[in-house]
Amino acid sequence: MQSQKSWAIGAARWCRRFCLILAVLTAAGCASLARPPARPQIPASLATHCQDLPPFDSYSWHDLAQAYIDLAYLYQECAAMHEALLDALSE
């Protein structure tokens, strides 16, 4: 009977020590959080929206062709700005 009692006391001490060590290691792990990387600075010229499309309300083929040229120009500007933004973020 005495050996069972001493075994139970020894097991309880071991369990307490184990729980204490586990709590200390857990607290130490929480104290050393990895910081997320800093967000890169985006140049102000790239942090803008693309221009709105001009309204088109004409029935002329000439006006349609001019609007198409303007649209292609606006798309090229916007695509270049987004490409520069991706290059700035990848640095």
Image (spheres, rainbow, N blue to C red):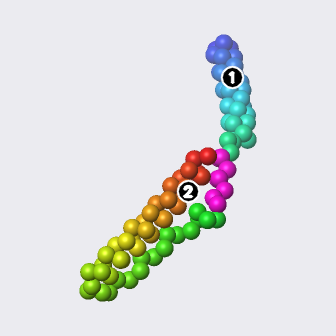
| In-image side of 67 versus 16 (left or right) | left
- Residue 87: give x, y in percent of width and height: 56, 50
The outermost residue toward the top is 3
Q: What is the span of residues highlighted in magenta in the rendered image? A: 36-43
- Residue 62: give x, y in percent of width and height: 30, 81
Q: Overall secondary structure of the magenta stretch?
A: loop
Question: Residue shown at 57%/47% (left/top)?
Answer: 90
The outermost residue toward the bottom is 58
Magenta region includes residue 20: no
- Residue 16: give x, y in percent of width and height: 70, 29
Secondary element at image label 2: helix
Q: Nearer the viewer, residue 5 or 57?
A: 57
Q: Nearer the viewer, residue 60 or 12?
A: 60
Residue ID for mark 2: 85
Q: Residues within 10 Å of mark 1 (few under 14, many from 20)?
A: few
Name the amino acid, label 2.
Leu
- Residue 58: give x, y in percent of width and height: 30, 87
Residue ID for mark 1: 14
Q: Is 31 situated above or below 38?
A: above
Name the amino acid, label 1.
Trp
Secondary element at image label 1: helix
Q: Is 5 situated above or below 45?
A: above
Magenta region includes residue 41: yes
Q: In terms of image quadrants, where is residue 5?
A: top right
* Label pair 2/1, CB-CB below 8 angstroms: no
| In-image side of 59 versus 37 (left or right) | left
